[in-house]
Each structure stands twice: as C-alpha cells, then as structure tokens.
C-alpha cells in the first residue's frame, strides 16, 4: 500500500512554482498576484483562505485578502468583484465558498471575469473543461489528477466511482477522469444521495473518490482489494479534549480501508494541500495569459 502524500507533492509543486517566480523576477517582469475574497468568519473558510495567502507569500506571489463582514450585501460584494475584474495588477482571484445565505452564489460566480477565475467555477471555464479545451481546472479535482499523474496511478480502462456530485469536486472530477488522456480514460460512475445500494457499486470500483463530507462513511467492506482510494472529505469533528476543540477527519475509515487499498490519501495531508498548490498553478497560468506569453 502506498500513501499518496499530498503534503510532500504539494511542496514539490510549490518549489517548482517558486523557481518560476524567481526567474520572472530576474527578468524584471510582474510577479503573479492572487486575491481572495472572504465574506464572514466561517472557521474552516478562515483556515483555508489564511493558508492560501501564506502559500502565496512563501513562493513569492503577491496576495491580497479582501475580508468583508458577514452583513455585506450582494451588491457590495458584486462591487468588490467588479473592482477585482478591473484591477490590472490582479492576475486571478477567488471568492471563498460558501457565501452567507443572503447572497446568491450563482450570481457572484457569474460576475467573476472568466480570465481571472482561477477557481474555474465560471460556466465558461467549466464548459471548456468539459469540452477538453485549455482552461482553469477547479483546484481540488486538478490536485487529484496531478496526484494520480505524478504517482503514475493507472486510470485507463479502470472503473472509477465518484461519491458526491458537488460543482466543486464530484462533478468536475467525474468529467476529468473520463476524459481522453493520462490520467483519464476511466469508466466513471457518479454516485450521490439518491443512488441505490452505493456499497454494491463501490465494491466494484478500481478507484474511489469520496467527496461527501461524512466522517468514516467509506468502510472496509465497501472496498475491493487493491482499490485506489482518494478521500476529499475534510470534516471538523468537535473534540473538547484538544486545544483547538476539534480534529479533522475524512470520509474514509482510514485504518481499516488502508489494509485493502493499493494507494490511499490521508486526511489531513492528502488532497487538501494539493488544492492550494493547484490554485497557485492556475494563478501562474492566469499571469502568463495576461502578459500574452
Ligand atoms: N470552498 C471549498 N473549496 C473551495 C474552493 O476550492 N474554492 C473556493 N473559492 N471556495 C471553496
């Protein structure tokens, strides 16, 4: 069994990007600039965005955090989005999800200029991805694909089962795994809350991507020997015994499932760190496009 070490791999990717940034600086060109918009004070979002900003600093990107109060109106947020679209120094930006309930997420995502949409959430970019055109691939599925590629995990002709149909992970990874290419060329089944007898389906899977957010959902009896397990779940489970009051766990019963798996991602330290690395890669791509290189 091989652990797919997202922490190590993401550090390697970040070092590659840092080297690019160093040569950009040497040439006296503009360094990539990523902005993040965060509305409110959701604990997990604060952690993710903080981590994105710190990573930018570490590799030499410029970064801007627009932290807006919970009461921000939809119009106020759309004004910030429009300013970011018009700011020539910003190469790309993200609007951290989820947004507060009074704001229409779809409206905001549609307002992000597709050329600055380093999350790849705008329909123009999502559509391009589905049609195999070059675009920004959403960072989490992009991170999973990069992990499979660098660990040389075979996907061709394999039965990949994706659990969860979210726009951020489940839907895009199901498209990417079935695309022509390496990794890709898998036969994909997309399971969701209305799927009947998920266990019968996962037991047939060569590759399982679980993106549900239900701790320990995937048990050993749902997995066949030698399966590749990708755990995208990151749930904070309250634990008064710990200093920060919670611990982080994935969708997979890691201890038992890792006994049967050929490859498996840990949580934390698997898909999570890869997401940030790929967001930075998309920002580098955005900057190259802006400078017409
Ligand atoms: N919330 C959870 N994952 C993501 C992500 O990849 N991008 C943004 N913008 N929000 C998220």
Image (tube, rainbow, N blue to C red):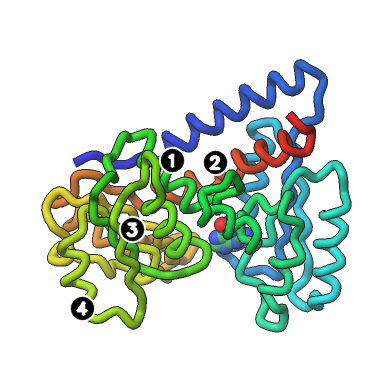
If you read the primary sequence from the N terminus, does the residue marked by circle 4 or circle 1 appear first?
Answer: 1
For the residues labelled 3 and 4, the Cα–Cα distance comes to 17 Å
Task: Give the foreground label among 1 and 2.
Answer: 1
Q: Are marks 1 and 2 in contact (CB under 8 Å)?
A: yes
Q: Of 253 and 278, which appears nearest the observer? A: 278
Residue with the mark numbered 2: 277
For the residues labelled 2 and 3, the Cα–Cα distance comes to 19 Å
Mark 4 Cα shell of 10 Å, populated few (<14), some (14-19), many (≥20) = few
If you read the primary sequence from the N terminus, does the residue marked by circle 3 or circle 4 appear first?
Answer: 4
In the rendered image of this protein, does residue 99 appear above or below residue 59?
Answer: below
Q: Residue at x 49, y 47 (%)?
A: 142
Task: Give the percent coordinates (x, y) of residue 28.
Answer: 82, 20
Cβ at disc 1 under 8 Å from ligand 1: no
If you read the primary sequence from the N terminus, does the residue marked by circle 1 or circle 2 appear first?
Answer: 1
Task: Give the foreground label among 2 and 4.
Answer: 4
Q: Of 157 and 68, which appears nearest the observer? A: 157
If you read the primary sequence from the N terminus, does the residue marked by circle 2 or circle 4 appear first?
Answer: 4
Q: Residue at x 37, y 39 (%)?
A: 182
Residue with the mark numbered 3: 209
Quarter holding residue 1: top left
Secondary structure beneath dot 2 equals helix
Q: Of 194 and 6, which appears nearest the observer? A: 194
Mark 1 Cα shell of 10 Å, populated few (<14), some (14-19), many (≥20) = some
Residue with the mark numbered 4: 197
Q: Are marks 4 and 1 in contact (CB under 8 Å)?
A: no
Task: Give the percent coordinates (x, y) of residue 64.
Answer: 77, 48
Residue with the mark numbered 1: 146
């Amino acid at each position: 069994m091989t652990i797919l070490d997202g922490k190590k791999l993401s550090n390697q990717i970040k070092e590659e990007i840092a080297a690019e940034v160093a040569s950009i600086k040497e040439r006296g060109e503009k360094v990539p600039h990523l902005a993040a918009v965060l509305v409110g004070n959701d604990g997990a979002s604060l952690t993710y965005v903080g981590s994105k900003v710190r990573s930018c600093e570490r590799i030499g990107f410029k970064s801007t955090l627009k932290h807006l109060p919970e009461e921000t109106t939809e119009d106020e947020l759309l004004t910030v989005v429009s300013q970011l679209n018009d700011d020539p120094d910003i190469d790309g930006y993200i609007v951290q999800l989820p947004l507060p309930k009074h704001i229409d997420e779809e409206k905001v995502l549609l307002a992000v200029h597709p050329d600055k949409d380093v999350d790849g959430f705008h329909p123009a970019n999502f559509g391009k991805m589905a049609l195999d055109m070059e675009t920004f691939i959403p960072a989490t599925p992009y991170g999973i694909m990069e992990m499979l590629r660098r660990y040389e995990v075979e996907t061709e002709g394999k039965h990949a089962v994706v659990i969860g149909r979210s726009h951020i992970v489940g839907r895009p990874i199901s498209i990417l795994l079935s695309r022509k290419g390496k990794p890709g060329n898998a036969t994909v089944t997309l399971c969701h809350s209305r799927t009947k007898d998920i266990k019968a389906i996962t037991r047939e899977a060569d590759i399982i991507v679980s993106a549900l957010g239900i701790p320990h959902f995937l048990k050993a009896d749902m997995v066949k020997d030698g399966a590749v397990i990708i755990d995208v779940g990151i749930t904070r489970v309250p634990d008064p015994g710990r200093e920060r009051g919670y611990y982080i766990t994935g969708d997979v019963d890691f201890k038992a499932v890792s006994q049967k798996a050929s490859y498996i991602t840990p949580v934390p330290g698997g898909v999570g760190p890869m997401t940030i690395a790929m967001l930075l890669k998309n920002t580098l791509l955005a900057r190259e496009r802006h400078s017409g290189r």
